[in-house]
Image (cartoon, rainbow, N blue to C red):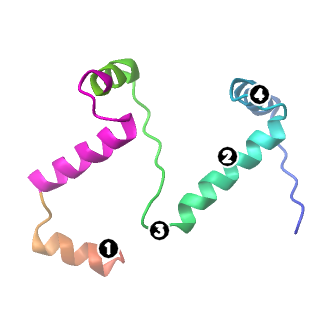
Amino acid sequence: MQKMTLTLPPEVIDTLKQKAKSEGLLSHTTFARAIILKELQSVVDSNSITIKVPVKNFKELKAYVDAKKLGSLEVFATYAMELAMSRAPLSEAQKARVVENDGF
């Protein structure tokens, strides 16, 4: 194992401390490690990756998912993306370019 040292601005450290506390962790360094490991895991598993999409109407989306009994917001987002892709599929030329660039 190797040791790594990160130097972060005080504002980032304060944010890490607040987030760690809200997640029930005692140490902001443990929280930082968890974030790094989680992100690395999504890179390792090439068929599944975690993306972050900032939304301004989170409460409205969450309420919709709950009211319609659609599971979780993540499941609904995946469904919505797949639905959009099925309604507007790639042309053959677009597919060829994607495959050429190691897309899928």
Q: Report the residue at 51% width, 66% height from top.
A: 45
Tell me the element at label 1. loop
Query: In the picture, which quadrant includes the C terminus?
Result: bottom left
**Marks 4, 2: nearer the viewer:** 2
Label the magenta part by its dominant secondary structure. Answer: helix
Query: Do labels 3 and 1 touch, CB within 8 Å?
Result: no
Residue 86: x percent and y percent? Answer: 13, 55
Q: Earlier in the sequence, mark 3 or mark 2?
A: 2
Question: Residues under labels 4 and 1: Cα distance?
Answer: 40 Å
Q: Which residue is mark 2?
A: 35
> Which labelled disc corresponds to residue 2?
none
The residue that disc 4 covers is 11
* Callout 4 amino acid: Glu
Q: Position of residue 76 (x, y in %)?
A: 30, 39
Which residue is label 1 attached to? 104
Q: Say whether disc 1 or disc 2 marks the residue closer to the N-terminus.
A: 2
Report the magenta residues as a range.
66-88
Q: In front: 15, or 40?
A: 40
What is the quadrant of residue 90 in the picture? bottom left
Q: Three-letter amino acid code at disc 1?
A: Phe
Query: Contact (CB < 8 A) between labels 4 and 3?
Result: no
**In which quadrant of the rendered image does the N terminus lie?**
bottom right
Relative to 17, 19 lies left or right: left
- Kindly state the secondary structure of the residue where label 4 is placed: helix
Hey, what amino acid is under mark 3? Ser
Side of 44 where 2 appears, left or right: right
